[in-house]
Image (spheres, rainbow, N blue to C red):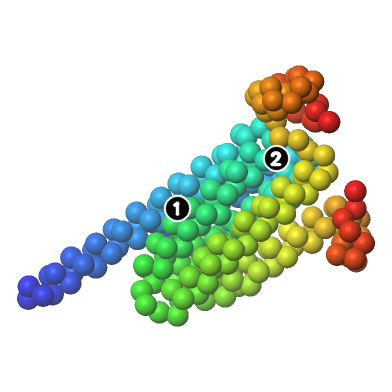
Amino acid sequence: MSQASSLDLLYLMIDVLSGAMILAGSFFIIVGAIGLIRMPDVFTRMHAVSVIETIGAGLLLSGLMIQAGPTLLALKLFFVFVLFFFTAPVATHAVAQAALSAGETPQLSEDRRSKTAAATPVNSNDNEGADD
Amino acid sequence: MYTFATIAIIAALTLAVTRAVRGPTIFDRILAGNTVGTLAILLLIAIGFLFGRPEWLDIALTYAFLNLIATLTILKYVRYDDLEYDSSEKGPKS
């Protein structure tokens, strides 16, 4: 009798833990999407998207993995997790590389390069490349 | 719980599509497209659990592979205007 009730408690704890992880993951997904809208240029938007792909998807998939239990389903969820773990940085790096080589420059609030090298001062509100 | 996750992912998808439509540069659109792909995978998984049909996970897994390849292919096309361009042989285009 007491064993059954402690098992019930364990299942309740697992449910609460996975639910909290799923809700936290959903929260971070929304945060990342808002960042994608509100950030000022491509590079900062990339930074916001990485929140979705790492902690948002990671927490959501971990919560679902706990919910699925030790089944084939959990293994597939783990595969999706590992795929995100490796492909998201690759895709982000490729987009950043392409943007840089196409002449996009990061928007700076102050240009620290001009203090060390005597370069021309950069207009801080200029989005397109004012420097070189 | 699953319902909340589904609603959150759909809201995030709406925001990502908004960025894809009005992104000023092509890279904003590519980044938003990549994000839409990621969110579509998560949405497939969440809806699969919500409707008690987690077999959709296999589709999500396939889509996760395709998402990276699609992003890299579009980036290569944008950069070189040519999908057959071999940068290891000719060197990166200036």
Give the residue type that dot 2 points to.
Val
Viewer can see residue A132: yes
- For image coordinates 40% across by 79% down, the residue present is A71
Identify the subunit bearing mark 2: A
Residue in the foreground of this view, choosing between B3 and A4: A4
Residue linked to disc 1? A25
The disc label shown at residue B23, or none: none
Q: Is residue A107 above or below residue B38?
A: above
Query: Between tags 1 and 2, which lies in front?
Result: 2
Figure quadrant of the C terminus of chain A: top right
- For image coordinates 52% across by 54% down, the residue present is A54
The first of marks 1 and 2 along the sequence is 1
Badge 2 marks a residue whose secondary structure is: helix
Residue in the foreground of this view, choosing between A54 and A118: A118
* Residues behind callouts 1 and 2 on a single chain: yes
Residue B2 coordinates in the image, percent (x, y): 43, 59
Identify the subunit bearing mark 1: A
Viewer can see residue B29: no
Kindly report the distance in space between the C-alpha atoms of the residues bearing marks 1 and 2: 24 Å
Q: Is residue B42 above or below residue B23?
A: below
Mark 1 nearby-residue class (10 Å; few <14, some 14–19, many ≥20): many
Residue A99 coordinates in the image, percent (x, y): 77, 45
- For image coordinates 87% across by 62% down, the residue present is B87
Badge 1 marks a residue whose secondary structure is: helix
Residue in the foreground of this view, choosing between A117 and B28: A117
Give the residue type that dot 1 points to.
Gly
Residue in the foreground of this view, choosing between A42 and B33: A42
- For image coordinates 50% across by 57% down, the residue present is A57
Mark 2 nearby-residue class (10 Å; few <14, some 14–19, many ≥20): many
Residue B23 coordinates in the image, percent (x, y): 74, 39
Figure quadrant of the N terminus of chain A: bottom left
Residue linked to disc 2? A42
